[in-house]
Image (cartoon, helix red, strand yellow):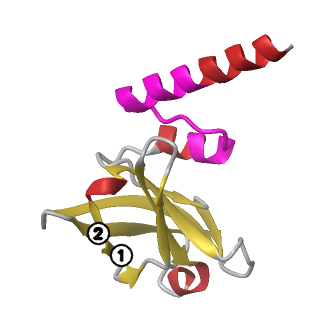
Amino acid sequence: MFNSRILLVSLLAMILFTACSSGTAVTTDVDRDSLNQRTEDSLGVAVSPHTLLLSRNQGGSVVVHTYIPYSTVDTTTVTLNDVLNKSTKADDCGNLVAYFDEWTIKDLVSAPEFTLYLRGYTKDGTFFEGSDTVRVVE
């Protein structure tokens, strides 16, 4: 039993390392995995939730996943349609994930769909921009 667990953990670590170094999105969160597969943005910008329900609380944050290496980003510059992030982190592959206040973002959008633009700068001063279009339901 003990050896099986070590083997399983080793196998999972190897899969994660291989996928991250090849640029493939790997996650234990099914919703996040589906977001990364659906984005066509070159920076991998994928907004969650993909459908914004204007009259409902959806957890307090609009979360943006990217393929931008977290270690290269000046996180104090990361915005979504000019709204400054409330926090950032690295995902399992070391890429930027940014969190924005749900109600501030919902005040900007309109039905039936809306394009959100993630903008910021890397630590060396290089500007980046990516976008994702979300569904909006009144």
Is residue 18 part of the magenta span, yes or no?
yes
Front position in the image: 79 or 40:
79
Q: Position of residue 11 (x, y in %)?
A: 61, 17
Q: Secondary structure at mark 1?
A: strand
Magenta-tinted stretch? 13-33
Q: Residues within 10 Å of mark 2 (few under 14, many from 20)?
A: some
Q: Which residue is mark 2?
A: 119
Furthest-right residue in view? 1
Horizontal side of 118 relative to 64 (left or right) equals: left
Q: Secondary structure at mark 2?
A: strand
Front position in the image: 49 or 30:
30
User: Mark 2 and 1 residues: CB-CB less than 8 Å, in contact?
Assistant: yes
Kindly identify the residue that appears in the image at 39 percent across and 82 percent down.
84
Is residue 30 part of the magenta span, yes or no?
yes
> Which numbered disc, 2 or 1, marks the residue that appears first in the sequence?
1
The secondary structure that dominates the magenta segment is helix
Task: Examine the rendered structure and indicate whether residue 128 appears above or below residue 61.
Answer: above
Kindly identify the residue that appears in the image at 59 percent across and 78 percent down.
102
